[in-house]
């Protein structure tokens, strides 16, 4: 009984591997066909064939992650204070 279960498990894994390999081969064939059509079209129109370029900046993810939302300041800016306002007497505070 254990032999049959082991055999079935191996057949299942083999089938999964074959399906995965076939799907990868199909994806590669589609990408190759798209690239060939692009290169052929570029040659037909006399333009240079530009390669597929994926620009990835690994620092951008860290910047996006560590960027904090702009929070309003709890203290007003010096130029936001109205100069014509009467300021009351200021007492010094002594620590206890």
Image (cartoon, rainbow, N blue to C red):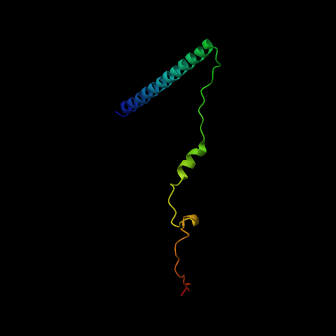
**Quarter of the image with the N terminus in it:** top left
Tell how many labels. 0
**As drawn, 30 above or below 74:** above
- Residue at coordinates 58% horizontally, 15% vertically from top-left? 41
- Residue at coordinates 57% horizontally, 17% vertically from top-left? 36
Image coordinates of residue 34 in percent, x first then y, are 53, 19
Outermost top residue? 44
Image coordinates of residue 81 in percent, x first then y, are 54, 67
Outermost bottom residue? 96
Outermost front residue? 84
Image coordinates of residue 25 in percent, x first then y, are 51, 22
- Residue at coordinates 52% horizontally, 72% vertically from top-left? 85
Outermost left residue? 1
Image coordinates of residue 45 in percent, x first then y, are 61, 13
- Residue at coordinates 58% horizontally, 66% vertically from top-left? 78
Q: Nearer the viewer, residue 88 or 16?
A: 88
Report which quarter residue 10 is drawn in.
top left
Using residue 37 as the reference point, say whether residue 11 is left or right of it.
left
Q: Nearer the viewer, residue 96 or 4?
A: 96
């Amino acid at each position: 009984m254990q032999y049959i279960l082991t055999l079935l498990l191996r057949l299942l894994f083999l089938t999964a591997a074959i399906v995965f390999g076939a799907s990868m081969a199909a994806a590669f064939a589609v990408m190759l066909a798209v690239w060939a059509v692009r290169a052929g079209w570029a040659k037909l129109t006399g333009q240079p064939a530009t390669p597929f370029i994926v620009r990835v900046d690994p620092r951008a993810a860290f910047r996006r992650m560590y960027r904090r939302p702009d929070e309003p300041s709890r203290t007003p800016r010096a130029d936001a204070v109205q100069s014509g306002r009467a300021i009351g007497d200021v007492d010094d505070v002594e620590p206890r």
